[in-house]
Amino acid sequence: MTALRANRGRDALAPGRNARSKRDPGARASRPRLLASKRRRLATALLGLALLAPLASAEVVHRERSLYQTILVVKQGRTLCLQFSLRRAQRNQSCLDERRPERMVLDYTRMMMAALLFGPAPQRILVVGLGGGTLPMALTAIYPEAQLDAVEIDPAVVQVAKRHFGFAESERLKVHVEDARVFTRRAVAAGRSYDLIMLDAFGADYIPEHLMTREYLADTRALLTGDGALAANTFAISQLYDAESATYFDVFGPFFNLKLPSSGNRVILAAKTQLPSLMTLNARAAALDKSLAPYGIKIRSYPRRLKSEVDWAADTRVLTDQYAPANLLQAQ
Amino acid sequence: MSALVLSLAFVGGFVIMSLELLGGRVLAPYFGSSIHVWGSIITVFMASLALGYLAGGRWSLRSPSLAKFAGLFLVGAGLLYPLVYFSEAAMEWIFHTFEDPRYGSLAASMVLFVLPTAMLGMISPYAVRLLVRTTEESGNIAGRLYFVSTAGSALGTLGTSFYFVLWWEINTILTMLTAALVLAGATALVVARTRT
């Protein structure tokens, strides 16, 4: 459990994925910090030169201690990744392929886009948790008519997204620097609504507790339009899996789980009213296929992967504002 | 007598820090967990304790007794318990009154926590007055009191953040803290009655 916990971030380790695999940019994440510490580098060198050779290839482009976390921008070949540092290892929050900036590098970002299968083109979109701005940039490019609100608690993350990840605000894409709970409560009070909501608020550790409770999800659901859809990024293997599932079920009723063999993430897809049928999903996928292809999203393969079975213990306690020991449960 | 007063000071310290820690959880649904939320809570607790120390010292000048000391706990419990019922409504109102979440969280912390915390802050100086007999021993006794009450605070912090929130709902924990204060006050009251 310790190894996994040290690797928390938006992008989770896939089950059985070799932590030293060259294909996994996240596995290399701990290396820049090793480089930063001469003493530790010496120790590593003593441990074996074989380990040191690949260390040299990851480069820390930017490092900053913000109010909420240590932000790292790490470059590996032509791939640039945003990481929030925790203890010795970091996980990727966002990645950008400089040669093909539109391509979504991380599995979970592509999986989140499955929410587009739920309904017609969204007019109003809410993205909670900015990271490198991958999702907001893609969504506003795919839907040039849509208005998008992004909520990010850490002003430093917004600056890093703009400076390193090509993120830009516009008339149609506004970033609100505040706690998502506060934003949501104000939005509900103002009677605002969204056709599509993506929940992707992560700290270095995991999703903050107060953004996992029944009350928060109920407020978020209240923001959805009648045929609105919600996508939430979570981990597929986590001590919190059951509690999260039970809480989403309590608020939304049946929902879809989307998991990929290559990814350690589980994306929850929920609708305000009713889940679409497989036929509708397939039809939407065919229609979206072309516009999503540049992002590397194989949308046609998603409908059959959406599972609505209850795969958690039925007696799991729901997370509420009164009972939210989320990160303690995770540590058990 | 000495053991009783020290144990009571321990309970006071325990409740203060447990309450402070729960404060973050109570405020989060309305004001988030931005850095200013913890800033507000810590500010309000420090300021309230400061006022409590001052008031507790002052009050110890007026014919101090164990029965009055017990009263601090009972009144503290009376100020703490209403949080279970009115904090939601208070925060709802404050949330819509203050646009800026910094002042919202500061106002909410004040409304919710000033009274119980200030009352519990009166315990330490009052306990010093009850225990000190001579000038020579005053420093030693004050030191021992700070030791137990701060150890209580440490344990209250640890217990709440490591275990209580995992086992119980916030309102359940608040009720238990109230019960601990009532029990402490009642014990002191019974002892005070039997000794006179």
Image (cartoon, coloured by chain):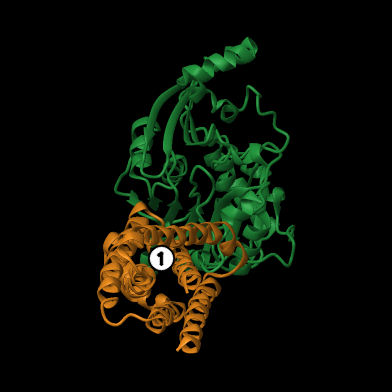
Chain colours: A green, B orange
Sort mark 1 into few (<14), some (14-19) or many (20+) by Cα contacts within 10 Å.
many
User: x, y percentage for residue A206?
Assistant: 54, 47
- Drawn side of residue A247 relative to residue A201, left or right: right
User: x, y percentage for residue A165?
Assistant: 40, 33
Mark 1, chain letter?
B
- Compare residues B102 and A299 and report the one nearer the observer: B102
Rendered position, B106 above or below B74: above
- Compare residues A269 and A123 and report the one nearer the observer: A269
Task: Name the residue tied to disc 1.
Answer: B27
Asked which quadrant contains residue B79, the reply is: bottom left
Asked which quadrant contains residue A255, the reply is: bottom right
- Drawn side of residue A316 relative to residue B196, left or right: right
**Residue under the point 38% across and 50% down:** A153
User: x, y percentage for residue B177?
Assistant: 50, 73
Considering the numbered disc 1 on the image, is that residue within a helix, a strand or a loop?
helix
Rendered position, A281 above or below B88: above
- Drawn side of residue B76 relative to residue A287, left or right: left
The answer to whether one can see residue A166 in this image is: no
Q: Quadrant of the C terminus of chain B?
A: bottom left
**Residue under the point 33% across and 68% down:** B125
- Compare residues B113 and A314 and report the one nearer the observer: B113
Asked which quadrant contains residue A64, the reply is: top left
**Residue under the point 64% across and 12% down:** A48
User: x, y percentage for residue A302?
Assistant: 66, 46
The answer to whether one can see residue A230 in this image is: yes
Rendered position, A266 above or below A227: above
Residue type pointed to by label 1: Leu
Total numbered labels = 1
Rendered position, B196 above or below A167: below
